[in-house]
Amino acid sequence: MSAAEVTFCKVRKAFGNAVAVRELDLAIGAGEFVSLLGPSGCGKTTSLRMLAGLEFPTSGTISIGGRVVNDVAPGKRDVAMVFQSYALYPHMTVGENIAYPLKKQGMARGEREAQVKRIAAMLKLEALLDRKPRQLSGGQQQRVALGRALVRSPKVFLLDEPLSNLDAKLRAHMRAELIELHRQLGRTFVYVTHDQLEAMTMSDRIAVMEGGELRQFAPPREVYDRPANLFVASFIGTPPMNIVHGEFNGRVFRHPAITVPFQVAGAPTRVALGVRPEDVLLGAGPFRATVRVVEPTGHETIVMLEAEGAALTARAPAESHLRPGEIVPFALRADRLHLFDATTELRLEARATEEISA
Amino acid sequence: MKPATNPLDRRDAWLGVMLIAPSVLIFCAVIVYPLVSAIYLSLFSIYTPTLQGNFVGLSNYAELLAGGEFWHSLANTLIWTVCTLTLQVVLGIAAALMLHQAIIFRSLARSLILFPYFVSTVVAVLVWRWLFNDLYGILNHLMIWAGLLNMPLDWLGSMPNAMVSIVLVGAWKYFPFVVIAVLARLQTIPDNLYEAATIDGAGAWGRFWDVTLPQLKDVLLVVVLLRAIWDFKEFDLIYLMTGGGPLIATQTLPLMVYKEAFGMDAMGRATAVAVAMMFVMLVFMLLYLRQAKQDAAK
């Protein structure tokens, strides 16, 4: 009756010739909230379904709480899952839906009802217990699906894009509730999403996946501040990180519009410079760019620039009055620059020497 | 609706009447007229070949309800309908579940299973009568060979064998209808429900009872309604298999109507049976629909 750690060891999953997950190694700590984040087709849902027991790994092992569960039936893994479509049993009332897993465990009716009451109180569903799912709103159905998962007090919660069918306001609300729920229960949460905001706000650690491979597994702050490779760098953050391809001569990164000196050991010639939009400082500095598009969003203005063939996006204050066609000087925040090997796409541990770029 | 005041609206309304008129006329000609004339005829004593006779009021009905043959036939009809319909539904669901799985030759099997439904009743019954034949039939031959029987059994000429035989053939002939309807519904049940039930700890039976069957409820409601009506008025299969025999042991109401009209040449009595049959069916349908409505409201 406690949280359990989850381990994927060299897990591979192929559907015929299509490889969904290749060699996934992932160790999730007991009680941790981990998001599997990636674009569609990256293997995140397949990984979750293998953990639930709905798909079988082609090779490799999956363990929950130190026990290999490859041959354990889904109902016996002590996991509960919340589906994107909620998958509520349409002919059962809310109360019956929540009680169903307990009924299948053979729990007596009286005890079942007590448990359902406890969960209903926790999720504020008391008034809805006799309704059918089709009589509920999307948000209410979502709560019932959560309730059905919570009622068993499983070791691991699996959530497959549970918020993506809700409207924006409700989604923000449910995010906060899920964080609170995780804190209260202290169980392991594995959360699949393609929404980086959800992953960034809720997770202890994010597993960024692409093309069936794990690209980075780190806390949200680190994924944002120290992306392990070009994919993570450009996938995380809205608007995404600017990537400028150029050359490195051992001392200075060179692009026709931008030069930045770096201290780095053993860097190749072909490299890519990564700059987040908030680290492009418009108004003054050594570089010049032409304004192409200005997008005011209210609390800030997104400016798209072009500098000698390099497309750049910058965040500017809401009150900036830039016009398309205008030429603006800009600087880069030297302590926040990223350098990547353009061939392997991996991060280079580089440090910009401040005096020239600012 | 507002009264059509401007000429354009009036023309539209006129067009509407013109468009539905053919259907209404055909409906009157083939449903309303026969129904009314059946009720009318049932009040006369009529000799079928001449269609001449005199008004006798309700005495056809009085005779019917007082005599044993009507009640016996009604009981036969109910036994036949309930038994064959139950078998059709059970077999139909089982076959649909099987065809829903990814078995080999699935598309071939799906079309083959419809074969009994499409084959002409006369052809099917003639073949079955040969299979059931007490002297040459393969059924007796196989059962004796397997040691289940010592002597050939009279399948169609003795009771309760004759009723069992028509019930079985009826189930064989009409279960594909249930298969088509159920299979179509099965394909629309979301996989997520099965997956959720699996994770919640339901086994194969649990998933069938808690996911599949509740989802099939609506389609089964319609299938049972339609099949019950069609089985209730089934004529050719029973007539060709046993002719209602031995004596009247398998005679259902439609066979009785036929016998009264063309065997006994008493068209008035025949129509009285037919009208009574219609009322019985009507009562059952109303009860059934009310029950279904209550279930849906729950």
Image (cartoon, grey):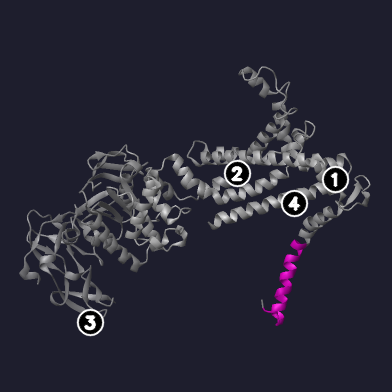
Q: Do labels 4 and 3 share a chain?
A: no
Q: Name the residue under label 4.
A: B279
Residue under circle 2?
A: B178
Camera-side residue of B264 and B295: B295
Q: Label 3 amino acid?
A: Glu
Mark 2 vs mark 1: in front: 1
From mark 4 to mark 2, how far is it between C-alphas? Answer: 26 Å
Estimate how packed mark 2 is, as few (under 14), some (14 to 19) or many (20 or more) residues with alpha carbons within 10 Å. Answer: many
Q: Main secondary structure of the magenta part?
A: helix
3D distance between C-alphas at marks 3 and 1: 100 Å
- Give the secondary structure at mark 2: helix
Q: Which chain carries label 3?
A: A
Please identify, in this view, whether the residue under mark 1 or under mark 4 is nearer the observer.
Answer: 1
* Image point (29%, 62%), residue name: A177
Judged left or right of residue A295, residue B268 is right
Say yes or no: labels 3 and 2 on the same chain.
Answer: no
In the picture, residue A126 is in which quadrant?
bottom left
Residue topped by disc 3? A319
Q: Is residue A106 left or right of residue B156?
A: left
Q: Given the image, on which type of amino acid does mark 4 rest?
A: Phe
Residue B12: in magenta span: yes
Q: Mark 4 lies on which chain?
A: B
Chain ID, mark 1? B
What residue is shown at x 37% (from left), y 66% (from top)?
A167
Q: Earlier in the sequence, mark 2 or mark 1?
A: 1
Q: What element carries label 4?
A: helix
Query: Which circle, 3 or 2, is nearer the viewer?
Result: 2
Q: Are marks 3 and 1 on the same chain?
A: no
Where residue A357 sits, quadrant-wise, is bottom left
Q: Give the range drawn in magenta.
A: B2-24
Q: Which of A199 and B278 lies nearest the eye of the viewer?
A: B278
Depicted A282 relative to depicted A342: above or below:
below
